[in-house]
Image: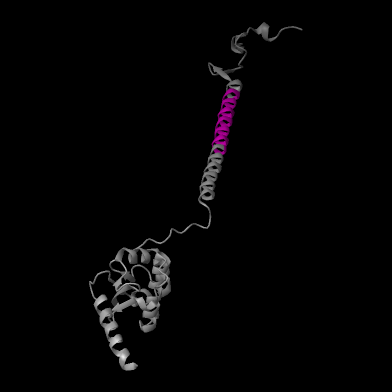
Amino acid sequence: MLVALLPILSLVTVIHAQLCQPDAKNAFKVRVSLKTALGDKAYAWNENEEYLFKAMVAFSIRTFSNREKIEISNVLLCNVTKRVSFWFVVTDPSKNQTVPADEVQAAIRMNRNRINNAFFLDDQTLEFLEIPATLGPPTEPSTPIWVIVFGVVFCLVIVGIILLIISGIRQRKRKSKASMETVDVEDKCETMVTIENGIPCDTLDSKEGRFNRAFAAEDEKLTPL
């Protein structure tokens, strides 16, 4: 029985080797940079990591194309290097051929974030060289945008009101100061004593004229009772 299975296993190995080759049809190259991403906490890339990678690719194909027959064994890896890089293809279990590159590419792009998270990597440290990097979903702020806009507008209105109040107070102070200066000038003018010929003269009402005591007659000074 075992002797009969050996040729079959050898044939499968040869077929897989023909399907998974560098630059083969529907093949993709992957480069993993563990040191760059994790530094001293970088883990070793081994058979367990390869198994997880195959599982994630098979999961992506199954969820994207509804290919329920795709298994981990349908994801083939070849030319694995220590640095780490390798090529992979996905075989079609119903046919002796690989899944079209467009389908694999679309499936990987749809599940790129989940694949990256599985290895604690990102698009720059887990590179699918033949598949364009995808942009992560935009992060939504914890506070709604309309609340932020309302807060900014409200603050501007409050600042404007405060500036108007301060400006009004300053204008009132200026007007009050100007009026006080005018009153002081008028008071000084009213109390000002006119001096003529070195003799102080009392300031009288403009209608009645002025009375100069220096030229007053003696009889006027001593008016009898």
Report the residue at 55% width, 18% height from top. 195
Residue 170 image offset from top left, x and y in percent: 55, 36
In the image as oriented, which residue stretches furthest toward the right?
A: 225
Residue 194 falls left or right of residue 82:
right
Which portion, as a residue range, is magenta? 165-187
Question: How many labels, in total?
Answer: 0
Q: Is residue 63 visible?
A: yes
Give the colouring mode of the picture. one colour
Residue 76 image offset from top left, x and y in percent: 32, 77
> What secondary structure characterizes most of the magenta part?
helix
Residue 23 falls left or right of residue 48:
left
The image quarter containing residue 94 is bottom left
Residue 183 image offset from top left, x and y in percent: 60, 25
The image quarter containing residue 18 is bottom left
Report the residue at 60% width, 24% height from top. 187
Tell me the quarter of the image containing the N terminus: bottom left
Q: Is residue 84 visible?
A: no
**Residue nearest the viewer, comparing 91 with 109:** 91
Residue 28 image offset from top left, x and y in percent: 28, 70
Examine the structure image and report whether residue 134 is included in the region drawn in magenta: no
